[in-house]
Amino acid sequence: MSRQPATAVVAQVGPRGAEPRDRRWVVTLETWGLSILFHASLIVVLGLTWKAAAKPAGDAPEVLRTVELVAKRESAAGPVYLDQAAAEAEAAAAAATSDTVDMKALFGGAGGAPQSPIDISGALPKASDVAGLGLGSGPPLLGGGGLLDGPAGKTGVSGGKGRTKVYGLKGEGYKFVYVFDRSGSMGGSGNRALNSAKRELLQSIDDLGETHQFQIIFYNELPTIMRLDGQSQLMFGTEANKKEARAFVNSIAADGATQHEPAIKLAMQLSPDVVFFLTDADQPELSRAQLDRIARMNDGRAVINTIEFGLGPKIRKANFLDRLAEENGGQSVYVDISRQ
C-alpha cells in the first residue's frame, strides 16, 4: 500500500488579539459617546455649582405679596383696623339699618340713646310763656328795635315780627313789655297823664298779632303785673287776651310814690324783645349803680325805649331816662302832657 504524502493545511491567522474592523468601529463610537456624556454631565454640574455660589447665602426665596387697603377706626380700647372686605361689610350693614336707628334715636325709642332734636326755641314762642303755664324765663326770641316813627314808619306785622309804637317810639320783635308809672303824680289835672298813657298803651297792643306776646306792668312803690288765670307770664295777642288787657288797664288808678328799678327788673325777667318804659318822675332818678345793674341784667337782649311825661317843653337836655334808653339800645322821647 502506498502512502500519499500528507498535505499541510495552514490556517491564516492574523496578529494575536487582533479584532475585526467592524468591531473596532463599534468600540470607538461607544468610547466617544461615554466621553461626551461624561463631559456634558460635568458641565451641568459645574453650572449648577456656579449658580449656587453666585447667590448670597441665606437669601429667602422670592414671595409674591398682595397690597390691600386697611381702614382705621378709633374705639374705647384703642384703634381697630379693618381690611377692605370687613370695612365694606360693616358699611353695608350700617346703611341697611341707618334709617331705623336714626329715627328711634331721634324720638328716644329702643335701639339707641335718644339724641337731642333740632332746637327751634329761638324761632318760636316758648311753651312756658303761654298763658297758664308759668313765667317765661328763656332768652328772647329775636332782638327788637326802637326807632322814632317817621313818614315811612307803620305798625303791624312785618316778616313775622310785631311792629308797634308808643308816642312815636317804634319797636319791633315778638315779645313786648309795657312798664308804666301809676304813681300819684300821674293822676294830676283829672288823670290827664294816666288816661293819655292808657290810651296809647291799648292802641299799641292792638297792633300786635296772635303770634306776638305782651305783658303790662304798672308801678308806684311796687310793680303790679297783669295776671291771667292767676299767671303773670307773657301772653299772646289774641282778642281774648287783649280784652283782658283792656280790663286790667282800666282798673288802674294813680296812687303812691315812685320806685323805678323793681318794675324794670321784673320786666327783664320776662325776657322781652322790646320794653316801653313811661314815667313822669324826675325824682327819684335811677342812680349810676342802678343803671349798671339793669344793663347787666338785660345784657343787650331787649331794647328799652323810654317815654318821659312833663308839663311844658323839656328843659333839661339829658336825664336818667335818656341814659337808660341809650345804654340798652333804645331811644327816648319827651311828651308835653299839657298838649294831650
Image: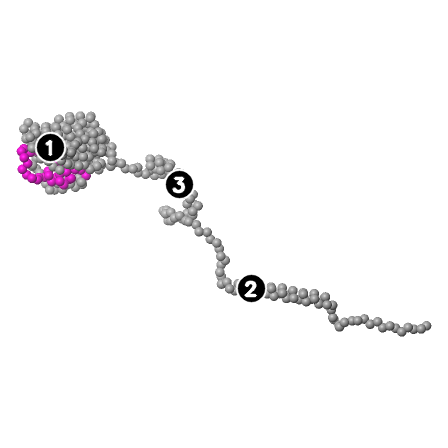
For mark 1, give the secondary structure.
Answer: strand
Tell whether 184 sits left or right of 9: left
Identify residue for label 1: 181
Q: Earlier in the sequence, mark 3 or mark 2?
A: 2
Circle 2: residue type: Gly
The residue shown at (18%, 33%) is 163
In the rendered image, the quadrant that contains the N terminus is: bottom right
Magenta residues?
301-330
Identify residue for label 2: 47
Identify residue for label 3: 94
The residue shown at (12%, 42%) is 289
Residue 227 versus residue 291: which sits nearer the camera?
Answer: 291
Q: Quadrant of residue 248?
A: top left
Q: How is the image coloured?
A: one colour
The location of residue 302, given as percent across then percent down, is 18, 37
The residue shown at (6%, 27%) is 190
302 lies above or below 196? below
Categorize mark 2 by other alpha carbons within 10 Å: few (<14), some (14-19), many (20+): few
Residue 135 seen in render: no
Q: Quadrant of residue 203?
A: top left
Nearer mark to the viewer, of 3 and 2:
2
Distance in Å between CA atoms under marks 2 and 1: 119 Å
Q: Earlier in the sequence, mark 2 or mark 1?
A: 2
Residue 315 seen in render: yes
Q: Is residue 113 magenta?
A: no
Distance in Å between CA atoms under marks 3 and 2: 62 Å
Q: Do the residues under discs 2 and 1 have CB atoms within 8 angstroms?
A: no
Tell whether 46 sits left or right of 257: right
